[in-house]
Image (cartoon, rainbow, N blue to C red):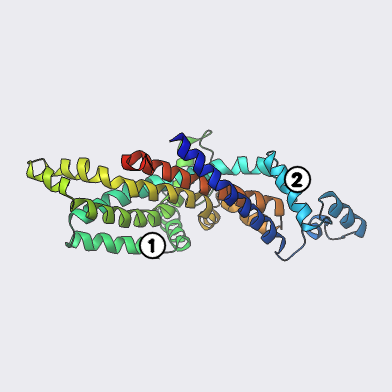
Amino acid sequence: MLGFLARRILIAIPTVILISVFVFTLQKLLPGDPVLAMAGEERDPEVLAFLREKYRLNDPLYMQYFHWIGGVLQGDLGISLRTRQPVLTLIGEKLPVTIQLAVMALIIAVFIGVPTGILSAYRKGTWIDWLANIVALSGLSIPNFWLGIMLILLVSVNLGWLPASGYAPLSEDPLRSIQTMIMPAFVLGTGLAATLMRHTRSAMLGVLKSDYVRTARAKGLNERVVILKHALRNALVPIVTVATLLFGELLAGAVLTEQIFTIPGFGKLVVDAVFNRDYAVVQGIVLCTAVAFIAMNILADAAYRILNPRMRDT
């Protein structure tokens, strides 16, 4: 397993380097000048020249890249042009918020998607199967921003059950933190649940036709034991793989949901950074999310090998 992980990490290194080049280059192609935003309304030419020199904006593009990537390799993602804080500090403050949201959304998705997929496969062709597929398609089709707004109107404005927006750190007020995260986690989790349901159904349909399941039934085993112990156990490989990859997507794709519910996570940070032409913050966030997604892919491959012993010798 260690050799496999080492090989996967070595393969991922060129990918990360290529991503860093794209992130840095494409960011520079965005319209607007961050120095003009920093200089204020007067825009004194001497101030502009000083800022360009200070942040090495007069250097050739390749020199700017090498200076930036050199700092990244030393754990320095740069300084925010707007707040003057280290980018690593900003990411350290926002990342736990997004991770909490992603974990809660994934838990909701697993508790909804996996049982529904198992039931749909077991009752294939019945009204239960049709209903599960309709619900899954609805979950994939409904936009997150619309569902979020509808939940705010119904649950917060009309019923007053949960706060409409805001965030409380989990370490300071666990109950309040969970209350503020339930709706955005549900919004994200419903779409993921639909994806998990479809993958679970497909995996279970393949397993339920296998010889060992027919043998287990022929032995007179309880149907629940056959489904949960024999069928589900072997169908878990693609389910766990998909769930791991979905978690990586959550870390990078919760922008709209965080904006709707005013959650101070990665999404809000990157939107603010883009609007303020805060290049260093955007570069740091995109690079971190890309690395996180690659790490989730490696973990998915490792989980596949753990769950499927036949893959351990490859």
Q: Position of residue 284 (x, y in %)?
A: 65, 48
Along the viewing direction, whichever of 132 and 212 lies nearer the viewer: 212
From this viewpoint, which residue is outermost toward the front?
Answer: 313
Residue 264: horizontal and vertical position, in percent? 58, 48
Q: Quadrant of the C terminus?
A: top left
| Kind of residue at disc 2 | Arg
N-term-proximal mark, 2 vs 1: 2
Whether residue 232 is visible here, answered yes or no, is yes
Q: Residue at x 52, y 33 (%)?
A: 171
- SS for callout 1: helix
Residue drawn at (80%, 55%), measured in percent from left and top? 38
- Residue annotated with mark 2: 84
User: Foreground residue, 158 or 286?
Assistant: 286
The answer to whether residue 163 is left or right of residue 49 is left
Please name the residue shown 37% across and 40% down the image: 313
Left or right of 36? Residue 112 is left
> Residues under labels 2 and 1: Cα distance?
40 Å
State the image quarter where residue 147 is shown.
Answer: bottom left
Q: Is residue 54 left or right of residue 268?
A: right
Q: Residue 191: horizontal and vertical position, in percent?
A: 40, 57
Task: Left or right? Give the position of 165 relative to 305.
Answer: right
